[in-house]
Image: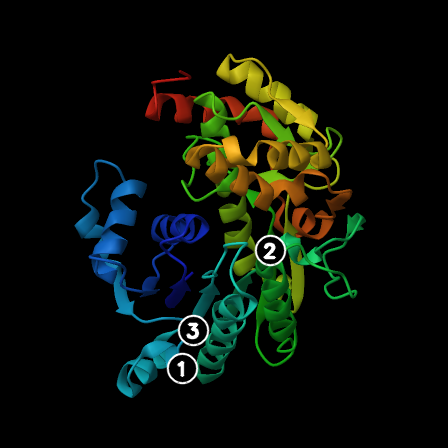
Amino acid sequence: MNGTLFLTGVTGYIGSSLLKKWLDDTDMEIDLLVRSRRDRSPGERVLAVLEELYSGADSKALMDRIRVHEGDVALENLGFDEETYSDISSRTTRIIHCAAAARFDLDIEVARKVNVGGTRNMLALARACGSLDKFDYIGTAYVSGMRDGLILEDKLDTGQEHRNTYERSKMEAEKIVRGHFGELPITVMRPSIVICDSKTGRASDFNGFYRALRLYWHGLMKMLPGDPACRIDLVPVDYVTDAIFALSGSEAGIGRGYHLTAGADRAATLADIKELAAEHFGLEPFAIIPPEHFLAGLAARESELTDDEKRIADELKLYMPYLSTKMSFDSSGAVKDTGLEPPPVGEYFGTMARYIMEREPRGPA
């Protein structure tokens, strides 16, 4: 691939992996849209990402192919002045829009500002680009909301309800993206639950699944509310990155949507994950209890809970709806058009467990 890539979401887990892939496997120059945060400038945030991705390497040398732009997808013209916006649109040949407000507990209008408004702003940039080869939109498989059965790659709004504002706003954003099929060279890609790198075990501290395993390792999670038969669609970030790279370079994917998911035949059940966790962490298995029993128990003990217990309980309640679903994701189109299949979680669960235990060797109290 040649030309210039404009990438959003680079400080996130998938976005950072995409940056590394494009640095390693292409000669493209890369423009990054990054917000300032606390006491870190956009450039400092990107350098921190590179230092994590390329441990022991000269991260500053990698910046030669990177231009970091302070801005925000939620702002008109991404927060750029007219000259910067014109310069970027004149050079950009490929866009990957990965940035999103991924919290489940945001007010709907806050979620829409980033996920819907930000997507509109990125599509406006795409329309302004004179030499655009591709616009890749990274969505989520969970736009499916509270549906049951097999979820197809080409289905979006069937009138389904959603579990949270993240799902709802991402569905609304994808509708806008699909409305530009035919006008722009767009591919929609929907990952499911991205948990770690299957080769290194590297995971994101912001990933709910990873945080749950850390709690289990430290003896702070003895039970999960859910259905043992529920299929949890888990995929490693290296598979998602390789699939995005393959589809990004394929004209066959233009005007199509794909699930980057484990799929109906490879998704593990919650009972499978329970056994894998016990095996690889060497601990007693956590219990799987009906959600209504979990909530009743919390209510009965509400006055006795410590602040840490309340925090853990609140987080489990956010993810609880995903532990009792009766859905699976069709990923046949992605497998066909990439030639890639995600590994079953059992093949790399031990690698992720070792990553957690080596980073936090204290173990359970």
Q: Upstream in the sequence, badge 3 or badge 2?
A: 3
Q: CA distance from mark 3 to mark 2?
A: 19 Å
Whether 213 is drawn above or below 60: the answer is: above
Is 176 left, or right, of 293 in this rendering?
left
Is 131 left, or right, of 141 in this rendering?
left
Q: Secondary structure at mark 1?
A: helix
Amino acid type of the residue tagged 3 in the rendering:
Ala
Amino acid type of the residue tagged 1 in the rendering:
Glu
Are the two marked residues, 3 and 2, in contact with CB atoms closer than 8 angstroms? no
Residue to which mark 3 is pinned: 74
Whether 189 is drawn above or below 294: the answer is: below
Residue to which mark 2 is pinned: 140
Q: Secondary structure at mark 2?
A: loop
Residue 200 appears at what percent x and percent y?
Answer: 41, 30
Q: Quadrant of the N terminus?
A: bottom left
Are the two marked residues, 1 and 2, in contact with CB atoms closer than 8 angstroms? no
Residue 64 appears at what percent x and percent y?
Answer: 21, 58
Residue to which mark 1 is pinned: 76
